[in-house]
Amino acid sequence: MGRGTSGVIHRMTGQIAPSTVNNGVFAAVPRLPDPQMGPRPLDIAVIGAGAIGASTALWLARAGHRVTLIDRLGPGEGTSFGNAGAIATYALHPVATVDTLRKVPRMLMDPESPLSIRWRHLPRLAGWLARFLWASRPARVHEIEAVLAILMGLAEPAWAELAREADTLHRVMRRGVLYVHGSEAAHRADAARVAATRAAGIPAELIPPEALRQMEPNLNAGGHGAMLYPEAAHLLDPRGAVQAFAAAAVARGAVLLRQDVSAVSQLPDGRVHLVHDGGDATFDKVVVAAGAWSRRLLGPGAPPLDAERGYHLMFEGAEELLRRPVCWSPVGFYMTPMSAGLRVAGTVELADLDSPPTQRRLDMLERHARALLPGLGRPTSTWLGFRPSMPDSLPVIGAMPGSPGIVHAYGHGHVGLTLGPITGHLVASLIGGGEAAMDLAPLAPTRF
Ligand SMILES: Cc1cc2nc3c(=O)[nH]c(=O)nc-3n(C[C@H](O)[C@H](O)[C@H](O)COP(=O)(O)OP(=O)(O)OC[C@H]3O[C@@H](n4cnc5c(N)ncnc54)[C@H](O)[C@@H]3O)c2cc1C
């Protein structure tokens, strides 16, 4: 779909019918028609109030359903709290590729690399890693990229609708995102990526060293230049945005419950039974949007979801050091100016959901960030989060045969903040029975 156009998007042809919306930062983004309610309003529980669950609750409430949004913490307190804040519609490639596999052995040996693994978790991770390997064959990568391109093309229109409804446009900034290079070779190599990204309809530019110095004068990155996604947007407060979505759902009649859900089961009459700390209840539909914890809830037979652990450090008062999110390509972490300070976020650690944080990963991020921004003080807080990741880098949206009332909505890996609103839109379309904005078959939980 073309960018910089106003209008209504039609199903996957990307054709745009004229219509303008005054969306501030999203002013030039095409409109996405609302999902239909279906024949009657339904009682629907959404488990998990992260970017995915809160967005889903808002679309469902907007369509006219009776929604109960349940989270054991509170809206936006899970992984959606601590991410790097990028609305990364430029992220058109899966993690599993031949290129990634080529780099893995070296990365695992290098304590400073973006990837680490806790070896004692290897037996449990083996199945996921085998599927990751299988997903990296070139023909499959090509298919995945085609699906990601569709999802990413719909992501901003969905963000625009929900941000406007939830009165949270002020938390969105459009200043582009920089991928800063660590060598001249990397800078030269990204010329091809710029061309491919532009061909996919996403503006991208190579930024020579001198221009980079002018754009980000506080950055001490060695003078090799960068790649810029000039139209990329980011959030000044990801948790605040998710909380605003949840509040907007409540304003439309949704009920917010703070409970830990321990079981979900399909009943023979088509309804779904749910057990939580405070009791139990039955719903017409239940959406499982519990992020990296979804598999625990669904039990054996669930799609192969695992966690890619990531970290952040906050530097309160340091947000002025950068004008826009900067990704340091050699180590793969972001430094994002947010309203609460500068956030240094990223890296991938393969371990489980219960192991404590690895201080070495945090120290590594801090060391690199301080080398890149010599004006940086000490971190004011640190965080460990859990990307809910599928081996093929595509989210799961849909139901399993035998449990049509349980809708799966998780597995967004590195781009769940970006894809939260469009996921909610697709789930609401699925539940309402209308035509979804894209073909959902490639996202089905049965694909594994
Ligand atoms: C370091 C890092 C940087 C990232 N940067 C970006 C980025 O720049 N852009 C981007 O698009 N994405 C980014 N991501 C990915 C993104 O944050 C995630 O994909 C996204 O937050 C997942 O959202 P979610 O709603 O599925 O999960 P979560 O936000 O984790 O929400 C799941 C919710 O379910 C609740 N829950 C779980 N189990 C239960 C239960 N049994 N009962 C009740 N409640 C339950 C949890 O409390 C939680 O609130 C990043 C991730 C990390 C770790």
Image (cartoon, grey):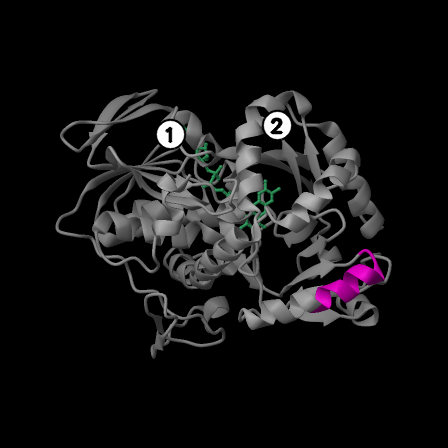
Q: Residues within 10 Å of mark 2 (few under 14, many from 20)?
A: many
Does residue 364 appear to the left or right of 195 in the view shown?
Answer: right
Residue 142 higher or lower than 361, as above or below: below
Please state, as top left, top right, bottom left or bottom right, where the N terminus lies in the image.
bottom left
Q: Amino acid at mark 1?
A: Arg
Viewer-side residue, 315 vs 397: 397
Viewer-side residue, 71 vs 411: 411
Instruction: Tell me the SS state at disc 1.
Output: loop
Name the residue tied to disc 1: 258
Name the residue tied to disc 2: 351
Which of pointers 2 and 1 lies earlier in the amino acid sequence?
A: 1
Give residue 408's position: percent from left, percent from top: 35, 39
Does residue 82 appear to the left or right of 273 in the view shown?
Answer: right
Please state, as top left, top right, bottom left or bottom right, where the C terminus lies in the image.
top left
Residue 223 higher or lower than 392, as above or below: below
Does residue 329 appear to the left or right of 155 in the view shown?
Answer: right
Instruction: Tell me the SS state at disc 2.
Output: loop
